[in-house]
Amino acid sequence: VSIDHEALTSLVPRKKIISVLAIDPSNTTGVVIIRCPIKTSTNPSVVMAADFHFKDIHPTSNRLLELNRKLTKLIEHHRIDLIIIEDIFYRGLVSTFRYLSQMRGAIMLTAAANKLPIVAVNNRRAKKIVAESGDASKLDMKIAIEGLSGIEGLTEAQSDALALFYTFMLVPEHFEKL
């Protein structure tokens, strides 16, 4: 896999190894932490992958607070340098759009509170880059990310989070700095 390290060094200068937290926000939020050495001959490695379940936490403010707490612990423990999240999209379900917008806001607030750069990657672009189809299913993405990363056993949410990282690294011009 040919990775473009310039995107990383433009956001996090003067580091030899950059720790990236990739997040796929949802009721089951997939998070993946990747260590990315800046040497071009060294591949990135997944340090940790997890799913956070928020569906049963009510009201929404408590759900967002719990997301903030979990992310803050990861940021501090793994010394995160950069956060990558899925860009917001609308597919006709207002309640889903609202929920994802709220989660994205909580993630952005957590990044700002920890003085971390955060970038958003377009979901359809990630599907096109990783699975070669903008309409790829969750299973298609999981299989494609296993082939790309060589890592098996990731959940669909974790695979989606890792796909955001690979999309950012492979095609860095397709991101928005938040």
Image (spheres, grey):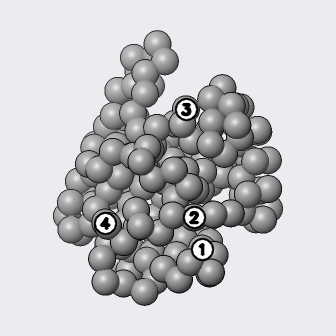
Q: Give the Cα separation between the discs numbered 3 and 1.
A: 23 Å
Q: Amino acid at mark 3?
A: Arg
- Residue 126, given in percent of the width and then of the height, sits at 57, 41
Q: Is residue 57 left or right of residue 76?
A: right
Say above or below: 57 vs 5. above
Q: Residue at x 62, y 29 (%)?
A: 134
Callout 1: 10 Å neighbours few (<14), some, many (20+)? many
Picture quadrant where residue 34 is located: bottom right
Nearest to viewer (mark 4 / mark 2):
2
Q: Is residue 93 left or right of residue 49?
A: left
Q: Give the Cα separation between the discs numbered 2 and 3.
A: 20 Å
Quarter of the picture containing the N terminus is: bottom right
Callout 3: 10 Å neighbours few (<14), some, many (20+)? some
Callout 4: 10 Å neighbours few (<14), some, many (20+)? some
Q: Residue at x 39, y 17 (%)?
A: 94
Q: Are marks 3 and 1 in contact (CB under 8 Å)?
A: no
